[in-house]
Amino acid sequence: MFLGHFALAFAAKKADPKVSLGTYFLAAQLPDMLWPGLVLAGVEHVSIARGDTAFTPLRFDSYPFSHSLLAVALWASLMGGLHYASKHRPSAAVLIGLLVLSHWILDFVSHRPDMPLFPGPSPRLGLGLWNSVPATLVVESVLFLGGVALYLTATRARDRVGSYGLAALVGFLGTVYVANVVGSPPPSAEAVAFVCLFGVGLIIAAAARVDRHRVAIAG
């Protein structure tokens, strides 16, 4: 998924508005932040295979260290533990860990059976939502709109950056999503990795900036 991960990050702000939206974005996308470096290093592998699923031309051949259930659980424990060590807020640390873990769950729903349980000779699972473009669009759009709505009930803008910046962030995510659906396949696996690494990094930074210009709604 793409929008689905960000949807849960937006929604998490309702559960605990003290944590930055940038932190929630990073947690929800942590496996996808680790994956590009591993692809570029030749440790994990992705291919351009038009028709592998109806929704994306990417075929995820091997990603045991960034996307296996065991690895994601370890990354979740690490990020949650680091947050606890820094802020000493156990509930926020658990929420962040769950967001990291949610990445595997949402990918399990969307991917064909290519999601490993653990590194090595592991079974590969996936419900294959990506085999249907309409179903994928409906599920992700509903999740995303719901997540943004929850964020809006948890925070309010304190200036124009908080207001127009949020609109720009939401619009940009939607535009990128549509471009991925209707655009041409990427030229190479390396190009995918570079775009993912720097693109998602910029989105996380933008989310953190926008969130600094919003305040929690008491209640």
Image (cartoon, grey):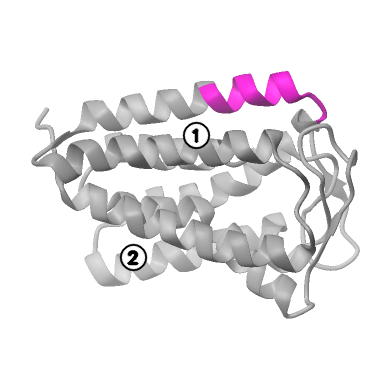
Residue at figure coordinates x 18%, y 52% from the top left: 212
Front residue of this view, candidates 70 and 171: 171
Disc 1 marks which amino acid? Gly
Report whether 163 appears left or right of 48: left
| Quarter of the image that includes the C terminus | top left
Report whether 186 appears left or right of 31: right
Mark pair 2, 1: CA separation:
29 Å
According to the picture, the residue beneath numbered tag 1 turns out to be 174
Residue at figure coordinates x 34%, y 54% from the top left: 206
Estimate the x, y position of residue 98 in percent, counting from the top left: 48, 48
Whether residue 8 can be seen here: no
Say which mark, if any, is on residue 83: 2
Q: Secondary structure at mark 2?
A: helix
Disc 2 marks which amino acid? His
Residue at figure coordinates x 22%, y 43% from the top left: 17
> Can you tell which quarter of the image residue 152 is in?
top left
Q: Which residues are magenta?
A: 131-141
Estimate the x, y position of residue 100 in percent, counting from the top left: 51, 53
Say which mark, if any, is on residue 16: none
Report whether 25 appears left or right of 138: left
Whether residue 110 can be seen here: yes
Front residue of this view, candidates 145 and 99: 145
Vertical side of 19 occupied by 131: above or below: above
